[in-house]
Amino acid sequence: QSALTQPASVSGSPGQSIAISCTGTSSDVGGYNYVSWYQQHPGTAPKLVIYDVTDRPSGVSSRFSGSKSGNTASLTISGLLAEDEAVYYCSSYTSTNTMVFGGGTKLTVL
Amino acid sequence: QVRLQQSGPGLVKSSQTLSLTCAVSGESVSTNPSAWNWIRQSPSRGLEWLGRTYYRSKWYNDYAISVKSRITINPDTSKNQFSLILNSVTAADTAVYYCTKSGGAYSHFDYWGQGTLVTVSS
């Protein structure tokens, strides 16, 4: 199972909105509504910020939102804060009953 | 609140067996529909899902194709924990290993262990 494709890096200024894409195939992202997103700060474990494409866990800011179109899912962060600077990973369930991750996107808040 | 506490050696010799344990508190490992996973992270391979175990009237396992011939994930209901065994390790298996809980077999990873750096030495 190939990794999902994410841009290596994105950047934005405080207060702006950014979007991170996650492209797969009809056998993973496009075939199921089981896409999730994780935020990872250096030296810590990833933290779930979006699940089932659009749902937000309790305690996660409403500035985080998710969507999907075809084989591409997206994570949008609005009203960027300095604390949002981190690496973001997407993940999806696959047709072989396994899970796959994206390569990660480094978000820099300018 | 679920808590996952990992334990195991941080150094394994090449060709030997890597063994890690994840102790669970706050939920039974037999809970349906939860699943219990191992994931690893390295600079070269990024985040890589290795496999999971879950109980649905009986125990099931799913494994990533990349490690399927070398991996075993076992639940231990008496201690409410689960373990990872990876045989015949090489330098490519050097990584931070995480145990995680997911809300279902198809599902996202909502709780993570603290991570264990395992280095494979020659």
Image: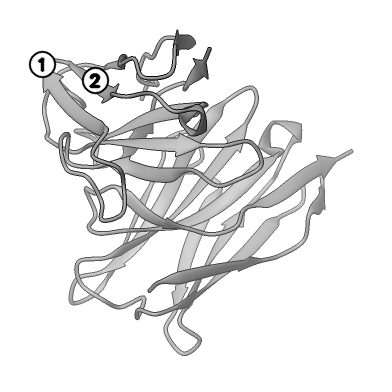
**Which one is in front, A3 or A47?**
A47
Q: Is residue B109 left or right of residue A105?
A: left
Mark 1 and mark 2: Cα distance apart in space: 8 Å
Taking the spot 72% from the left edge, 38% from the top edge, the residue there is: B94
Residue found farthest to the bottom: B78
Q: Position of residue B54 (x, y in %)?
A: 30, 65
Which residue is identified by label 2? A74
Q: Chain of mark 1?
A: A
Instruction: Tell me which amino acid carries mark 2.
Output: Ser
Which residue is identified by label 1? A69
Q: Position of residue A39 (x, y in %)?
A: 44, 36
Q: Looking at the image, tell me whether mark 1 or mark 2 is earlier in sequence order.
A: 1
On the same chain, marks 1 and 2? The answer is yes
Q: Is residue B21 left or right of residue A92?
A: right
Instruction: Tell me which amino acid carries mark 1.
Output: Ser
Q: Chain of mark 2?
A: A
Q: Which image quadrant: the N terminus of chain A?
A: top left
